Amino acid sequence: MRNDLVHLLASLLLAFVLVLALPVGVLGYQAQRNRASEQSAEVYVPFKWNQGDVRRYRVTNATSSEKDNTITRKSEAYSDIEIEVVEKNQGGTIVTWKMGKASLAKGDSGSDQITEKINDIFGGLKLRIEIDNDGVYRGINNWPEVAVAVKKLMTLTKELVDDIDMPKQQKQAVWDAAMKRHGTRQAIEARITEPLQLLLQNTNCNFNQHAVAKNETTVPYLGRPLPATEQYSVANLDLDKQLVTIAWSRSIDKEKSQTIAEQAVIEMAKELNKPTLPEAGFLKGFSITSNANYEIDLATGWPRKIVFVNKAGQGSALNVRKITIERR
């Protein structure tokens, strides 16, 4: 049951408390942002979020573990959000992001009691967020207010960790390691605003209808960057409906990443005072892959639907995280 509670926290966009939080890294396209081209092959996604615009979305977070193509654990939760553009000026755009109450999906084995406690902390909280003129996220403007809620959540999470059947010293080491990597303001802010950054991912970008673009990038893993390659393309273009679907994928370089990932795990094992350390090669076959489809309104840049899937694991054992954001 306690594992279900921890995974519930992850489903509610609060996975920064987990030592092995699945990486997302949604800022892959910034180098591609530029103004529209006159070439007919180019599809331009604008950033025209105008003052007074209000959009409502349902955000669903599902996490699961798989072994030999069989699901061994699954958790799913959803919440409704409301975004309003409250200010436009020469410096950028200010939006408010109102968090709705989270609910467990039907059949989820998580705890309604814990869900209610989280809703008491975050339900109805309104973030005030700044976006620059290129559609790039800048930060949360009302952080002191948000920090109060985060502090309450940390207290609740620490109580769950303290209730795990584990030696006290070991539990403290796990907590300290988690806070070192996921307890900073930067990490917390990135996790809380993750859906918004997915919504902004492709704004003010050009895409070629007839070509697949590739970039070298990195994927964060236990505080270390793993070399990776991403690619994106126009999967569908409907000019009558003014809709475009952008397909994106990313995968780590397994050979180059293995040593880096092993070093990161060994470093954490030392922090957790593990009596024995794994030998070199213990992460052979380790992989992290991601893919996403973004359906976007070409007139404004407001997305209609986003489906993002991240898989991380070794061999046939995988941890899977799926985020679905759909217009209401």
Image (cartoon, grey):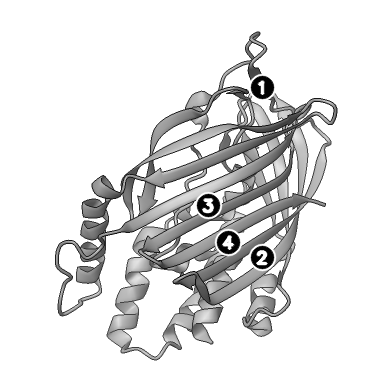
Disc 2 vs disc 1: which is toward the camera? 1
SS for tag 1? strand
Q: Which amino acid type is shown beneath numbered disc 3?
A: Glu
Q: Are marks 4 and 2 in contact (CB under 8 Å)?
A: no
Which residue is depicted at the point 80% across and 45% down? 55
Per the rendering, the mark at residue 122 is 2
Label located before the other in sequence (3 or 1): 1
Q: Which residue is mark 1?
A: 44
Q: Is residue 28 left or right of residue 264?
A: right
- Mark 1, Cα crowd under 10 Å, few <14 / some 14-19 / many 20+, is many
Could you tell me how far apart the alpha carbons at marks 2 and 3 are, in whole angstroms?
14 Å
Residue lying at the far front in this picture: please name it: 68
- Mark 3, Cα crowd under 10 Å, few <14 / some 14-19 / many 20+, is some
- Image quadrant occupied by the N terminus: bottom right
Q: Are marks 1 and 4 in contact (CB under 8 Å)?
A: no
Q: Which amino acid type is shown beneath numbered disc 1?
A: Tyr
Disc 3 vs disc 4: which is toward the camera? 4
Q: Is residue 188 left or right of residue 307?
A: left
SS for tag 3? helix
Label located before the other in sequence (4 or 2): 4
Could you tell me how far apart the alpha carbons at marks 3 and 4 are, in whole angstroms?
11 Å
Label located before the other in sequence (2 or 1): 1
- Numbered disc total: 4
Which residue is depicted at the point 21% across and 63% down? 267
